[in-house]
Amino acid sequence: MSTRRILALIPARGGSKRLPGKNIRLLGGKPLIVWTIDAASQIADICDVLVSTDDPGIARIASDAGAFVPWLRPPDLASDTAPSIDVAIHALDRYERSRGPVDGLLLLQPTSPFRRRESILRGIQLFRNGGGEPVLGVSPNKSYLLTKFCLQDGFLIALPNAHGPTCNSIGPAQEYVANGAFYLATPEHLRSRRSFVGERTLPLIIDMAEESLDIDTMLDFAIAEFIAGRETV
């Protein structure tokens, strides 16, 4: 598969109950969302880094950082109960209507600031080599509370019940969990399955704990500040 047109989508609504203003809160001297914009910018396969937000302040900061922010997200997709897949398909539909079809939609959460550019490139390469099968960022499982995945024949097999089957029940394997850092699928897959995961989902395995950090609380942000300070020393 020769893929040269991937749309990177960064969803960043203005409201956050646990950590108000988190998407533009300063981390290591720059707004949180800018970490992800910088990581995805100037990658040959990425046609645009699109930010979907309902907040004019976020839109302004993202645009100043080089992201494409052509519209504000409608209110019905800006609540904390709006499904992320609806946000993704809304952005995909509007983008393709105005700028033409894309080969893949790459969702990058702004709450994963330490996701490396090298990991993005590796995930895109997996997508290309896998003929367009969806790619999901995963990390070794260290929790019994999250949905687990096992690797079987090179693809991820979901084990949704934490108290049910284990990876060992389908053969020797390492357990993985989605880390929130990388989601990539074709528009056809997203519209038909309404999910970034399918029967044949390729794993982008990320072992570094920093890359897997997903900021949701003040404690998460404090950990991120420690990591950012360490990296700038």
Image (cartoon, helix red, strand yellow):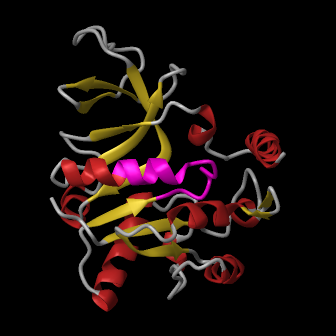
Position of residue 117 in the picture relative to residue 96 (left or right): right
**Which quarter of the rendering shows the C terminus?**
top right
In the rendered image, residue 209, in percent from the top left (x then y), is placed at 60, 32
Q: Is residue 103 above or below residue 146?
A: below
Position of residue 216 in the picture relative to residue 77 (left or right): right
Task: Between residue 106 and residue 232, name the one nearer to us.
Answer: 232
Task: Between residue 160 and residue 199, name the one nearer to us.
Answer: 199
Segment colored magenta? 108-123
Residue at (48, 62) in percent of width and height: 82
Quarter residue 152 falls in: top left
Q: Residue furthest bottom?
A: 98
Residue at (47, 31) in percent of width and height: 139
In the rendered image, residue 21, in percent from the top left (x then y), is placed at 76, 64
Residue 195 belongs to magenta span: no
Residue at (48, 49) in percent of width and height: 118
**Which quarter of the rendering shows the N terminus?**
bottom left
Mark count: 0
Position of residue 52 in the picture relative to residue 135 (left or right): right
Residue at (73, 44) in percent of width and height: 217
In the rendered image, residue 5, in percent from the top left (x then y), is placed at 29, 72
Position of residue 173 in the picture relative to residue 36 (left or right): left
Quarter residue 75 falls in: bottom right
Quarter residue 7 falls in: bottom left
In the rendered image, residue 138, in percent from the top left (x then y), is placed at 43, 36
